[in-house]
Image (cartoon, coloured by chain):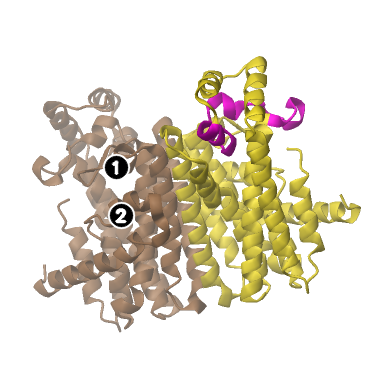
Chain colours: A brown, B yellow
Amino acid sequence: MDNDFTQKLDRLREQINKRIEFYACEKNLNSMAEPVRYILLNKGKRLRPILTLLSAEVFGFNTKKTIDVALAFEILHNFTLVHDDIMDNDDFRRGKETVHKKWNVSVAILTGDALLGLAYKALTFAPSKKLSFLVELMNQTNLDLCDGQNLDKDFEKRKDVTTADYVKMISLKTAKLLSVCAKTGAFVSNASEREVQILENFGNELGLGFQIQDDLFDIVTEQNILGKDIGSDLAEGKKTFAYLHAVETLPKEKLNRFFTLTGKGTISKTELEEAKKILYENGTIQICEKEMNFHFSNAEKCLFELKDKNTKNLHNFLNLVVTRKF
Amino acid sequence: MDNDFTQKLDRLREQINKRIEFYACEKNLNSMAEPVRYILLNKGKRLRPILTLLSAEVFGFNTKKTIDVALAFEILHNFTLVHDDIMDNDDFRRGKETVHKKWNVSVAILTGDALLGLAYKALTFAPSKKLSFLVELMNQTNLDLCDGQNLDKDFEKRKDVTTADYVKMISLKTAKLLSVCAKTGAFVSNASEREVQILENFGNELGLGFQIQDDLFDIVTEQNILGKDIGSDLAEGKKTFAYLHAVETLPKEKLNRFFTLTGKGTISKTELEEAKKILYENGTIQICEKEMNFHFSNAEKCLFELKDKNTKNLHNFLNLVVTRKF
């Protein structure tokens, strides 16, 4: 990766981490201060606010002018993580205990609620003429995220989920949020309606590719890179694109074997290797990669539509995502 | 009660119930639509939005101009009920199953999240110059409600809670919300800073009286009026003003007896009568009534400060609360 871009990312991340302290130190948090800080002051990759800031730069707006709107959607993202972890009964996130594990479910519900309020607060730093649009955009995003998570939970119980259902679900979750992050950067920077739409499409395609890639990591990454147990989605029979493609296309005997290997809660190294072999031989992994690359390539096409603008850093950002290893 | 005022209340309630359908039918709710409608289209008393509308009327603003802001805080109220019911593990509310009981905890968390977003959406109908203030006010209110609920849950585990702690907690929950409802009505209607402050104080005193009254109903009301089991707070050993006053002031032997009668999860009719007798003989009930009346009288004093305004309907509203039987 471009050395200048790496330095730029570090600089942006530093600015993001500095400004987010303002929200983490909100005076009225009182008894909620500790869990809210625990979440907001994590050292995450901050991909979402970076995307907003880079999108704004394309239209000449600097970090100072756009950082609060960028943080609004980063805080929204963190809110969903806290509540989703309760629903998914996950004990760890980024190697740290989740809020409901470290405290309890009540504290985790309230922490999420407090974060959602803070996300809206961050919008109030936008120019007042734009505030109404942004509040409504945040509301629509929140509703889509709720709808997506509700579908996701529903998938766990349903036996008739298709790859199309899966794409719809990740459109509402991962892709929606990245799409809004890119769009917002353009919107606050007075980009034209067409340009705002292009950035929205860019974020959407990036998000679809990103989620399929994330799910693939669970199957194909080397254990020591991922920082979590490889194959955990397969162990749980999680309905990812790969899993659903396998269900839709594997011949009966292979499918039965696949079902025997997966969804038991745990998966041995040998079982994982066998499941992977089935997925490769069926062409499932290749289809997933093709689907992922299709979306990444669509994302790139969006950037080419902005030919009169300097989109170098957004290309770099896309490349960063495409080449990530975890 | 004034017959004209009764008719006015019915009219306002009708307008509130009509307009709330707009939020309940938000198109992006999708899979969340059913539980959100289940909550928003309940036939509650709508005291909070009525308070906002009546406060606005004092400064010459009609229902049409203020109904969305009034609904914003009614939706916020409903959001807290859904999440609080999960934390309190309550199966019924207003005689209907709670969302987490009728669906499940995940759906209830998401329903609350969706409602909180809709509350902010309702603010966007306010004049754009006022929006930033209202969004920040909603954020502060939400944080106080979270803090209050967190303290409330904490009280369940603590043995050192005082009546002063209790008043602080209800200031953050019930009183904060009623205070903001009254304040907002004045604020959107261009009342002066002093008038906005007076309405805020009015709502706060009203809310403190309201909550102490609510807790007293659990002890002193006739069973058939309340629509729920009388004495259920005592059965659970809930740390209300009365309970805490008893703990702070009962002589040791009486206190031991009081502890034997309460906090077991159930309470028989005889036990309840005995507990009530202890509370009356100790002067606890009388102190609670005094405390309640002190706040109601403070609320009335606030209205007298607005002597150049027509506050007749706010007096009627206060009287409605003071004389309610459940």
Q: Is residue B173 above or below residue B119?
A: above
Q: Residue at x 88, y 53 (%)?
A: B2
Is residue B95 in view? no
Q: Is residue A1 left or right of residue B301?
A: left
Between discs 1 and 2, the one toward the N terminus? 2
Could you tell me what secondary structure mostly forms the magenta stretch? helix
* Residue B28: quarter of image: bottom right
Q: Is residue A322 left or right of residue A181?
A: left
Q: Is residue B34 magenta?
A: no
* Start-end of magenta stretch: B220-249
Q: Position of residue B278 (x, y in %)?
A: 62, 25
Which residue occupies the foreground of this view, A55 or B118? B118
Q: Which residue is mark 1?
A: A98
Q: Residue at x 43, y 55 (%)?
A: A116
Q: Is residue B267 above or below residue B91?
A: above
Q: Which residue is mark 2?
A: A37
Q: Residue at x 63, y 53 (%)?
A: B74
Callout 1 amino acid: Thr
Q: Residue furthest right?
A: B3
Q: Residues within 10 Å of mark 1 (few under 14, many from 20)?
A: many
Q: Residues within 10 Å of mark 2 (few under 14, many from 20)?
A: some
Callout 2 amino acid: Arg
Q: Is residue B223 magenta?
A: yes
Q: Is residue A25 above or below residue B103?
A: below
